[in-house]
Image (cartoon, rainbow, N blue to C red):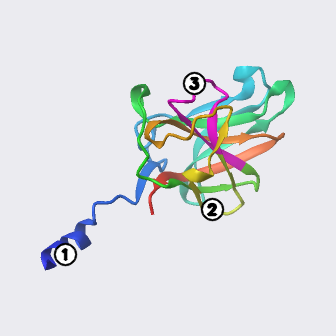
């Protein structure tokens, strides 16, 4: 019994409390081996503009999304998106409770979008909002906080395909930095 207790103390109980998606320490890929992509509403005729870059802010390596969100021409978004698996597969996050982010920004409201095998059209996704203030902070978003956008299927955590950090829904100058993203279980 003492040996088992010592093994658990040294090696953990085997239950993962977090799964790293990205800490931006790798040059050309996320911790998952996939690459971030920037999209704006221009793919649908909008006029928003933006870009994502990898920077170091206050000693933290991060993804920084900046741009102008415009509501003209039925537009209204700038996003940095990350496939959760290579080659078009899906990721099973069913053992986790949500997404944890370390963020800072310009005080605006931003969104995390999730796509699954059920989100076949570009305007279908699951969405949760968060605020990004001037100081770095940890934001925990439980999966139960994600609402449906333009679909009726419940969020299937066993078939996640993509995660995105999104500036949307109002005309404004977006500026958000994300230093770490992970699924959390605790």
Circle 2 SS class: loop
- The vertical placement of 146 against 46, above or below, is below
User: 176 or 74, which lies in front?
Assistant: 74
Res 155 → quadrant = top right
Q: Which residue is mark 2?
A: 136
* Residue sitting at the far bottom: 2
Q: Residue 6 got which mark?
A: 1
Q: Nearer the viewer, mark 1 or mark 3?
A: 3
Q: Is residue 107 left or right of residue 62?
A: right
Between discs 1 and 3, the one toward the N terminus:
1
Q: Residue 119 got which mark?
A: none
Q: CA distance from mark 1 to mark 3?
A: 49 Å
Q: Residue at x 78, y 24 (%)?
A: 46
Q: Residue 120 got which mark?
A: 3
Between discs 2 and 1, the one toward the N terminus:
1
Label 3: few (<14), some (14–19) or many (≥20) C-alpha neighbours in 10 Å: few
Q: Answer yes or no: do the residues labelled 2 and 1 have beta carbons within 8 Å?
A: no
Figure quadrant of the C terminus: bottom left
Would residue 15 be counted in the magenta stretch? no
Q: Position of residue 83 (x, y in %)?
A: 49, 34
Q: Residue at x 67, y 63 (%)?
A: 135
Q: Nearer the viewer, mark 3 or mark 2?
A: 3
Q: CA distance from mark 3 to mark 2?
A: 34 Å
Residue numbers of the magenta segment: 110-127
């Amino acid at each position: 019994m003492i040996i088992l207790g010592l093994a658990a103390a040294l090696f953990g109980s085997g239950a993962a409390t977090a799964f790293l998606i990205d800490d931006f320490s790798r040059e050309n890929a996320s911790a998952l081996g996939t690459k971030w992509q920037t999209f704006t509403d221009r793919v649908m005729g909008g006029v928003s503009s933006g870009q994502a870059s990898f920077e170091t802010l206050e000693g933290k390596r991060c993804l920084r999304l900046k741009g102008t969100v415009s509501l003209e021409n039925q537009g209204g978004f700038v996003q940095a998106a990350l496939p959760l698996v290579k080659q078009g597969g899906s990721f099973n996050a069913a053992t986790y409770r949500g997404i944890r982010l370390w963020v800072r920004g310009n005080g605006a409201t931003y969104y995390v979008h999730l796509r699954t095998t059920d989100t076949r059209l570009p305007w279908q996704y699951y969405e949760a909002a968060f605020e990004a203030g001037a100081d770095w902070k940890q934001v925990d978003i439980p999966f139960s906080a994600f609402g449906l956008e333009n679909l009726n299927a419940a969020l299937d955590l066993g078939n996640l395909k993509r995660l995105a950090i999104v500036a949307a829904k109002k005309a404004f100058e977006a500026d958000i930095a994300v230093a770490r993203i992970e699924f959390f279980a605790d």
